[in-house]
Image (tube, helix red, strand yellow):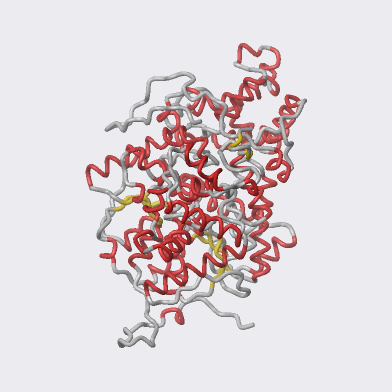
Amino acid sequence: MAKEFDIPKLPTYLEIPEINEGVMEGEGPFKSAKEFQSPLGFPGEKVDNWQEVAINKMGELKSKYRSVQVFLDACVKCGACTDKCHYFLGSSDPKNMPVARQDLFRSVYRRHFTFAGKYFPKLVGAKELDDEMLDDWYNYFHQCSQCRRCSVFCPYGIDTAEISMAAREVLDSVGVGQKYCNQILGKAITIGNNLGLPEPALRDTLLDLEEEIEEETGVAVKYPLDVKGAEILLITPSADFFAEPHIDGLIGYGKVFHQDGVSWTMSSYASEGANFGMFIGSYDIMRKAALRIRKAALDLEVSRVMVGECGHAWRVAYSFWNTLTGVGAGATDEFGQKLQNQLDSRYPQPQHIIEYTHDLIQQGKLNFDKSANDDRTVTFHDSCNVARATNMGGIPNGQFILPREVIKAVCNNYVDMERSTIMESTFCCGGGGGLLTDDLMEIRIKGAMPRMQALKEVEKSDAVDTLVAICAICKSQFSKVLPKFDFDPYMIASAHQLVSEAIIMDKPQTDDAPAEEVEEASETSVETETAE
Amino acid sequence: MADILGAEVDEEGFLVDLKDWTKEIAVEMAKGDDIELSEEHWDVINFLRDYFEEYQIAPAVRVLTKAIGKQFGKEKGNSKYLYSLFPYGPGKQGCRFAGLPKPTGCI
């Protein structure tokens, strides 16, 4: 059973905690059994010659990813990062200081890959990779959400996330994998989504949703699945089909598409935006998951690929899809180039749903009754991967500007949290990077403290009662941890949920009441239908 | 590995072999969580099992709340009601009692 622990108090100002050595020591999250390891090509259990395998893997990674070697070599121990990690601030375990976390990996790197470490290990803090060290890796690299906040403050730009990904990759290579991530990846690369939601269940869930929206609004908003020749393929986290408030966001996307009059579809083959391959540091598995999206886009002959509200999905899409799949520029293989030619270059490829809605708002294509959200005072949580690894709208800081502009277009009461806790300095929700599992609840709650502290302050000063996020993990994490800090768990909302509340839908012309004068905006838009 | 009434369960308390499920196991699992299964609990558990049989996965929260609301009255068709029955979540705790696999993902 889970051990007892204190839920951190929320101070008026964030302070650097007194160090408590070893307070987060432990066995780490549940380990992945053979049945979840094998489908990914990892050993089913810790291999006999694990040290040799691990060191070889480290050598391979340092040559393959030059960034990793630079990060391992460049640290001068200045200490700028020490108080920047939400897990350190919330747990006070010194091994959760970013530099100390990196040093778990760096000390072994020094022992085996640097001259000084090979001959004078004690002088340079070089250490052997023994059982104890490997256990520490497993435990503390699963207390890092790869949110990259520390890297913003590092004068050398050292990215702990990359080191944490490398460490997890080494761990997987010796057969010590994490159950949560690897079980999910198995489903993603065989069934097509993290939930393991098969096509009939997905179809049924979407039909249910259509029925519900029509009942509620009188408008037949559709959630098309596997429609060949649609213009847009929407890739969204499968949590949007399953959980709350995620599904309220999905309702919002559908309403926006409906009002635009654009043809769109989702794919039952590629029904997942999230890509946990990134969390475990495996390029090959990340690619495997992403290639399902390429296949779906080619098969469905779409001309645009769009991403729903999911933080690391947008990072993978924005930063890696171009070379992984051909969505974007730079693909070198045949199918990637085929897809590049198929996609409409007048639109960003891929495009974020926030960019799309924002664009429609700017064109005046969407009308809102902002008073529908008057019962709320809203603040926005910048999700780490969106904030620190992507952009939106092609303008500097667009990833901070666009979501806020969309929210402000649909609600009257908006307040930002303290500046040092948002935008590029945003605090992670506490559940990212493959940590969103019940067996890591202690670190999730402790790591949420800095975000909760900033939220508490705007609750006090401005009566904020709604926390909006554009990431499936953030939404789930918050609905779990909010009540631990005396907040209403239902205060977490999807951005497109607020859009959905405020959007004025065109009623069908056959209504009893005379239809409002509605301009057929979609006909004047830039899109062109290519007739088959 | 641990077991409940002879049926093997994983580290999170979910049945390893779903075929092992019996009503007694559900009662025993609930007891472990200090819950006494009422008729309302069984309504949900039975729905979960029926849905799983058809679709091989647990229903989405929305699907579950809507179905429960339709069958047992509108006041019960919301997640607050379901959480009052299953404090650790209808998805996770409900599925465990019903002998379904644990839902995974960003949920």
Instruction: Tell me residue A375's x, y (percent).
Output: 25, 58
Drawn side of residue A397 relative to residue B4, left or right: left
The reply to whether residue A248 is visible in this rendering is yes
- Asked whether residue A354 is in view, the answer is no
Left or right of A425 on screen, residue A119 = right
x and y, in percent, of residue A144 in the image:
52, 34
Which percent across, then down, holds residue A84? 43, 32
Q: Looking at this view, is A521 or A19 the one in front? A: A19
Asked if residue A133 is positioned above or below residue B51 in the image, the reply reads above
Image height of A68 relative to A232, above or below? above
Residue B1 versus residue A93: which sits nearer the camera?
B1
Q: Residue at x 53, y 53 (%)?
A: A314
Q: Is A289 placed above or below B69 here?
A: above
Q: Does residue A308 appear to the left or right of A364 in the view shown?
A: right
- The residue depicted at 42 percent of the width and 24 percent of the height is A92
Q: Quadrant of the N terminus of chain B?
A: top right
* Residue A15 falls in image quadrant: top left
Residue A169 sits in quarter: top right
